Image: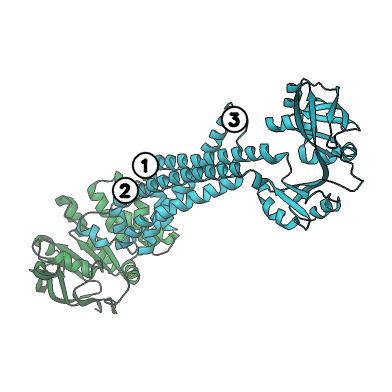
Amino acid sequence: MGDLMVADRLEKIYGEGTAATLALSSVSFTFGQGEFASLIGQSGSGKSTLLNLLGLLDTPTSGTVSIDGTDTSNLSRKELAHLRGESLGFVFQFHHLLPEFSVFENMTMPIRINGGTVREEQRERVNELLELLGLTGLADKNANQLSGGQKQRVAIGRALIKRPPIILADEPTGNLDTANASAVYELFREINREQGTGLLIVTHDRSVAEMTDRILEMRDGELIQDVRNDYA
Amino acid sequence: MLSLSIATRFLRSSLGQTALITAGIGVGIAVVVFVGSLITSLQADLIDTTVGSRPHITLLPEGDGTLSADLAEAALDEPEVTTAIPVRKLSVIFAEGDASSALSVTGGTQSDLNSVYDLDEAIVEGVYSLDDGEILVGTVFADRTGIAVGQTVPFLLPGGSTGEYTVAGTFDLGSAAANDRLAFLNADSARTALGLSQDEYSAIEIQVDDVFASSEVADRVETDGVTVVDWQDENEDLLSGLTAQSGSSLLIQAFVLVAVALGIASTLAISAVQKTRQIGILKAMGMTDRAAGRIFLFQAAILGVAGVIVGIALGYFLIWGFSFAPVEFSVAPSPTLIAASAAIGIIVALLSAIIPSRSTSRLDPIEVIQNG
């Protein structure tokens, strides 16, 4: 498996001088193609900070993130935006759908952001994803008309539409009930298996982490454990 | 284009807000269009009343000399000059008992005089006729002296002799002073009264297409032995009044536009805050800073265009409403003014979007993601 994402001695300090807080301390790891991994840790352990750095949403104080062989440290904001659009998919704790748009429009937004028009095969892809996500027939509904679980599934569909090699998910089931949460994890597993999409899921719930193939654990800004989970 | 489609959707998602600000811009533009048209029409009417049917430039001989009709021909070579006529001017006195009143008489051919003074339209009683021995006098003079059309009246001429002329008609030139003091004679009658020969004239009267170009033309037609009288020099008070009026009207229009700009800017600023979450997520998905900033520029452009259309329609409505007002002039919308108001309206809208657009383009997606 090739290294799709490499974090090299990542450090993140918030604030300056005496108010400085070390949020992340020398975190290094690699993430291969098609991996299904989780990143766990208590609240404040630095897992979301790490995910934001990996997702190119934030810049490290020191250290580098490379995506598919590209060192991102010296990229402009425009190049970072482009790389985010091309290589990464995001699922957040809050679905962050655009309430002004329909389910179909929300799902195809990443294609349009990167300058594309939605082609016929992508329309089919939307239909496939809607079926996979259990949202058949809801394409034309306004995003606001859906339930919480449905919204989160649309957000997952949106992250998948461009078939990015990596999906970063930050507490994707944090706002869902148990039934919906396990449905989402089953979905992630299915996407990983069938489409070879790499998934890195941030969670504070160890039982959720145990469903993934690799568990990375953070504590006080450090990566303290990185183990394979053969029981998943 | 995605930014445009998002801008449209954002505006549609808050229809009430969009309608309010469009109405705000519309009212502002309507005021600009209406006040601008009102002042332009009012001033055009004032200028027309003052000099529309008067010479704009008068060439006079220096000292006791006379002028040749060739000067009128030469003046017509200037592109701005529409009319140039040779006339003979004299002062006559009408005496009745102990009272006497002076008349400033202009002598010329019937068609020449008509081309400057529009006399055939100004005739109130009688006819526009200037045969030998006929005179036209103003309505005020006729009323004051009790002279009626058809009556033959003696006038004291410059040389001390007396000339008798028959009143062919009375005119109203739109000004009481003119209607009291001016009179018109046949070219030959005036020549005889002044004792001039065939090609001797006492003045050349000129009209130009743009009355405000008169000073420039006056400089060009000035030659040796000729004194040039420009209407602008003789009406300085009126002109400074008009300038002050234009200035205050511009000030009102400018402040209205500033209010419109502040309205758009505050609406867009609110919208930028309301849509921060959406902008953040779009950026996380790869939207560039510039594309995100363009969303608000497009919103401003759409609001500007919609507001301008509403404003122009409302402006026309106000102008139509004004046509029922009891005033002696009518307000005509000027296409140039409307085009300028539209352009300024849209530019103001775009300028108002600069701040929200910049803050949007600077927004970091992480701010939104972290704060949920």
* Disc 3 and disc 2 on one polypeptide chain: yes
Asked whether B330 or B92 is in front, the reply is: B92
First reached walking from the N terminus: tag 2 or tag 1: 1
On whether disc 2 and disc 1 are found on a single subunit, the reply is yes
Residue A123 position, x and y percent, is: 41, 57
Residue at position x 62%, y 32% from top?
B329
Q: What amino acid type is highlighted by mark number 3?
A: Ser
Judging from the image, the colouring scheme is by chain
Look at the picture and state if B282 lies above or below A166: above
Q: Amino acid at mark 1?
A: Gln
Residue B140, compared with residue B221, is above or below; it is above
- Disc 3 to disc 1, C-alpha distance: 33 Å
Q: Output the chain of dot 2.
A: B
- The residue carrying pointer 1 sits among few (fewer than 14), some (14 to 19) or many (20 or more) residues within 10 Å by Cα, namely some
A200 sits left or right of B98 in the view? left
Horizontal side of B202 relative to B230 (left or right) equals right
- Colour applied to chain A: green
| Residue indicated by mark 3 | B323
Can you tell which mark lies on residue B270?
Answer: 2
